Image: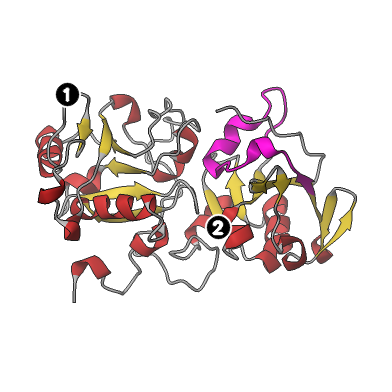
Amino acid sequence: MSFPELPQPAPGEVLLLCTCYEDGRALWGGLHDEIGARREDDRLVLGGSGVRLRMVEDSGWDYLHGGNIPALVPGSSPVPPVVVLADIPVVYGGGGPLLVDLAAIPGRGVRIPSARLGEILADLLGGALAFDDLVRDMDRCGMYQGDGGRPAFPTPTSTPTPARQSFPSLPSTTTALLVRTCYDDEAGWQALLGELGGTDPDGWVGADLDPDEIDVEHYPLTALVVDNPAFEGLQPGQVPALVPPEEHTTLVALADARTFAEPGRPLTVVDLYDCPGQQAVLPCREVGSLACNLEIANMDFYEFVAEEGIKPWWEGA
């Protein structure tokens, strides 16, 4: 799947990209009114902030995700610090626009209350806020300073090994990926694979399930296993930009240091869609249920993000 390149914004402009189309027509929902902007040709000027949004439309961007954005910046152009997406949650779900980081950890995202877009963009462009600040202060729904409760496991904003800034692309798949990022415990890794049912000759866990033997309370995970030291130290925010756009991967689960040190072998699962790069940490036995519910659109990713001070629902009463 090939997407058109992004246009180069003028100095002081921010691109507002539509990624939701119907019969080739761009859908913006009520975003224009919600952000409190006045229109000047194909630009929107945001209230007293003075921030100028350049509205860009191309049906080739239909269903484009935040993690795909960094690859669309023209190679000969300066990289803008941020792009704003008007995506499906904005158009149909009433969610705030998605800000996609292009500077610090390209491809990760945070949602912003529509009415505060001008204020927050002005602070980002002026240096009063960094993208890390947005990530640190988002709620479990991925909304900056939202009222959805604090996540029990906040998404990291930095990498433990700054020298590792580049990783290869992840495999393309329509299901899930299980990526090993810690190589300190080979026995623990093999035990994890065993707990997930073992791998088949093609490197999958859960590929040949017998429907009559499935425990629906702990739905098994079907995932392509990625066991490659090139991904050692990979962090959640770096994942979305590594997922190829050819297929719509359900999720990426990281087997990291926490997996081999804590009870339940918890995996760090990464959102690729609503809030790219947001993490949910949950026992490996629950990740299959998350993948299944996302695939059938029965639950949203944030419903699996544990809330600070509240016992997760999967731990029972």
Q: Amino acid at mark 1?
A: Pro
Relative depth, front residue between 300 and 236: 300
Q: Which residue is mark 1?
A: 201
Relative depth, front residue between 174 and 141: 174
Relative depth, front residue between 21 and 50: 21
Of all residues shown, which one is farthest toward the right?
A: 40
Q: Residue sitting at 25 percent across and 36 percent down?
A: 182
Q: Is residue 300 left or right of residue 79?
A: left
**Which mark is in front, 2 or 1?**
1
Q: Which residue is mark 2?
A: 134
Q: Is residue 185 above or below residue 111?
A: above
Q: Which residues are magenta?
A: 54-79
Badge 2 or badge 1: first in the primary sequence: 2
Q: Amino acid at mark 2?
A: Leu
Q: Residue sitting at 60 percent across and 39 percent down?
A: 103
Disc 2 element: helix
* Residue 295: in magenta span: no
* Residue 234 visible in the displayed image: yes
Q: Position of residue 194 (x, y in %)?
A: 10, 39
Looking at the rendering, in which quadrant would you find the N terminus? top right
Q: Residues within 10 Å of mark 1 (few under 14, many from 20)?
A: few
* Residue 133 visible in the displayed image: no
Looking at the rendering, in which quadrant would you find the C terminus? bottom left
* Residue 55: in magenta span: yes
Of all residues shown, which one is farthest toward the bottom?
A: 317
- The span from disc 2 to disc 1 (Cα, nearest Å) is 43 Å
Q: Is residue 221 left or right of residue 17?
A: left
Q: Position of residue 189 (x, y in %)?
A: 15, 37
